[in-house]
Amino acid sequence: PRRAISGTLSERRLSLSMSKFLASDGKRYFSYSQIAATVSGSVPEVQAFAPDVFVAIGGGGFIPARMLRTEVQKPILAISLELYDDSTKTANSSVICKQWFDEAPGTFGSLVRGRRVLIIDEVDDTRATLQFAVEELKRVNAPAAVGVYVVHNKAKPKTGSLPDDVTYIAGENVEDVWNCYPWDAAAYGQGIAEHEALARSCAEGGADGARKRPREAEPEGSDSAAPAGTGLSLS
């Protein structure tokens, strides 16, 4: 049966994000350090599933998978699935498989059949992509057990579904808003420094926090506010 995530640590990480943490454009920005902290916090659940190999869904699952491998130390296979067409910025009528792996002897693909496999992606939005990945993995590669790990699960009704025998692990539940990840900064016309600044603003209270922070940070009696810092928030 699907394993439920429980305990005070998981409850803290899975608490819903509030709308006050949105930027002025209505989006939620996440920094590399925030993603790394969420992934690291998920390690006990991933270790409990005991995967033999990771299958990362490209491109959003690649970086979280690499972060997770540092602590769990399992090989990574890559697949590419497309639900949203980047050229038209619209959703396809169904998930399109762009790339899969083979099971040639001596390759990481040979570690899948009859073994424990963890599928990794950055966000569970509609669940359609995850459903396709699980069904295709079972149909083509026949693993012994399948788990799914996502950094963020959007708290919303899903169009896709997962079988009861799939272990589901989410690093954090978040609101159903547009998530902006640091590896996509250029797609939003931003440099990484600008993106990370927006992520800090969201972590500190979003648009309201951005307006309040300069006055609150200014020392009493000072002539000018101190320059904004460049450190990354772990919130």
Image (spheres, rainbow, N blue to C red):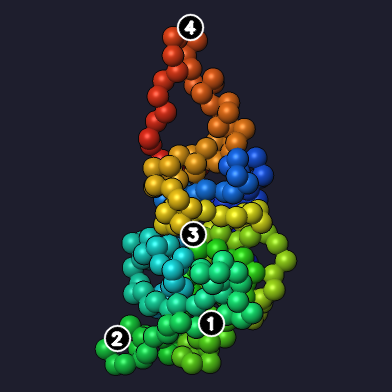
Tell me which numbered mark, 1 or 2, is placed earlier along the sequence. 1
Q: Residue at x 27, y 89 (%)?
A: 106
Q: Mark number for residue 42?
A: 3
Q: Are marks 1 and 2 in contact (CB under 8 Å)?
A: no
Tell me which numbered mark, 4 or 1, is placed earlier along the sequence. 1
Q: How many circles with numbers are drawn on the protein?
A: 4
Q: Secondary structure at mark 1?
A: strand
Q: Are marks 4 and 3 in contact (CB under 8 Å)?
A: no
Report, in whole angstroms, how far the alpha carbon at label 4 lies from the one at label 1.
60 Å
- The spot of residue 188 in percent (x, y) is 48, 53
Q: Which is in the foreground here, disc 1 or disc 3?
A: 1
Q: Amino acid at mark 4?
A: Gly
Q: Residue at x 43, y 90 (%)?
A: 113
Q: Which is in the foreground here, disc 4 or disc 2?
A: 4
Name the residue that disc number 1 marks: 96
Whether 41 is drawn above or below 115: the answer is: above
Name the residue that disc number 2 marks: 107
Q: Secondary structure at mark 3?
A: loop
